[in-house]
Image (cartoon, rainbow, N blue to C red):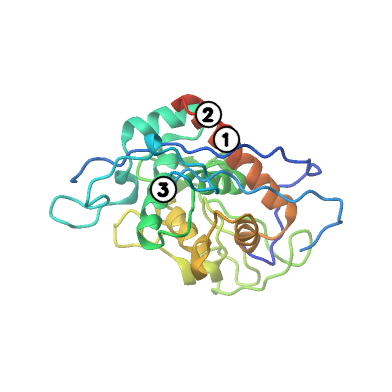
Amino acid sequence: MSTARPSWRWLLPVIALVALGAVTIAFAIVQLNHDNTADSAPEPSPPTTPSQAPAADSPATGTDPSTSPSTSPSAGASPDGSAIPIASRVDPSWVASMATATGIPERALAAYAGATLAEQEKAPNCGLGWNTLAAIGQVESQHGSLHKATLAEDGSVKPRIIGPALDGGKFGRIRDTDHGKLDHDRTWDHAVGPMQFLPQSWKKWAADGDLDGTRDIDQIDDAALAAADYLCADNRNLADSGTWQRAIGTYNAGIEYAAQVATTANQYAAAASAASGTSATP
C-alpha cells in the first residue's frame, strides 16, 4: 500500500466502467443498547457507499430512510459503555445474508462493516462504505486467502501474506524502513497482511480493531480499521468522486488499481442491494 507501489495484480487492460446508480444497503448494528496514464484511459467511478450517515435526499447516495441501519444510542459499546471489537458491532444475520449475496467470507465482511461503523463515529463526514473496504480486501489479498492463506475465526491470517520485494524492478523501489521487522527483509520493503500495508504506513496507521491490546498487521480487524482510518484522513469526504479517487490513489497508485477497486465495490453494492430488495438505480 503505497503511492510508490504499483498494483502487482493487474494483468488485463482496464475496461470502461458502467457506473451503477446510487444504492444504500442497510446493515444493522447488534443491539447492545447495547500516476497518470494515457488520456484514453477511463476515469474510475467511485462506488456507491452504503453507510448510515447520509440524509435521505443526499445526491451522493440517494439514501432511502427506510433502509437506514437501526442503531442504539450507544452503538458500538457494551451496556456499561466500554468499547467492543469492531466485528461484534455488526448484526450476524446481516453478515450472513450479505456474505451469501456477495461471496465475501463472513469473517472478513464483519471486519469491513465493523471498521466502517467505527469510522462513522470518528469521522462522520467521511462517507466510507463497507464495500470500498471489501473491494480493497479482495484486490489486495482475496480477503486474506491469497497464496493459500486462511482467515481464521479470530481474524488472523496464516500463513502470512507478504508481497514481493519493492526492489525497483517490476513493482517499484522502496528500501527497507523497519529493519525487516514486519516483512523479514532488511534490504527492501514488502506490503504485508490482508490489507497489504507497507511497513512505513503501518507504523503511522496501525490500529487495534479486535481490542486484544496488539496492533497486528496480519489480523483482519486491525488491518481493516487501519485502512478505514487511512482513507478517511485529512477530513476526506469519500462521497465526492474526485476525493474517493485520490484516496484510493494514495492507498495504491495507478488508475487501473482505482478502477479495479471501484468495479469490485460496485459489484458488491449491486449484489447486496439485490439481496436486500432495494433498487440499484436512482
Name of the residue lying farthest toward the left: 80
* Direction from residue 191 to residue 119 in the image, left or right: left
Q: Which residue is mark 3?
A: 156
Q: Which residue is mark 2?
A: 279
Q: Earlier in the sequence, mark 3 or mark 1?
A: 3
| Marks 2/1: CA–CA distance | 7 Å
| Marks 3/2: CA–CA distance | 35 Å
Vertical comparison of 4 with 196: above or below = below
Q: Residue at x 39, y 29 (%)?
A: 96
The amino acid sitting under disc 1 is: Pro
Q: Residues within 10 Å of mark 2 (few under 14, many from 20)?
A: some
Point out residue 243 in the picture as x, y percentages from the top left corner: 61, 61
Point out residue 92 in the picture as x, y percentages from the top left corner: 32, 34
- Residue 102 in view here: no
Question: In the picture, which quadrant includes the N terminus?
Answer: bottom right
- Residue 231 in view here: yes
Cβ atoms at labels 2 and 1 below 8 Å apart: yes
Helix, strand or loop for disc 3: loop
Q: Earlier in the sequence, mark 3 or mark 2?
A: 3
Cβ atoms at labels 3 and 1 below 8 Å apart: no
| Marks 3/1: CA–CA distance | 39 Å
Q: Residue at x 33, y 50 (%)?
A: 86
Name the front one of labels 3 and 1: 1
Q: Residue at x 70, y 47 (%)?
A: 259
Point out residue 23 in the picture as x, y percentages from the top left corner: 52, 37
Vertical comparison of 253 with 33: above or below = below
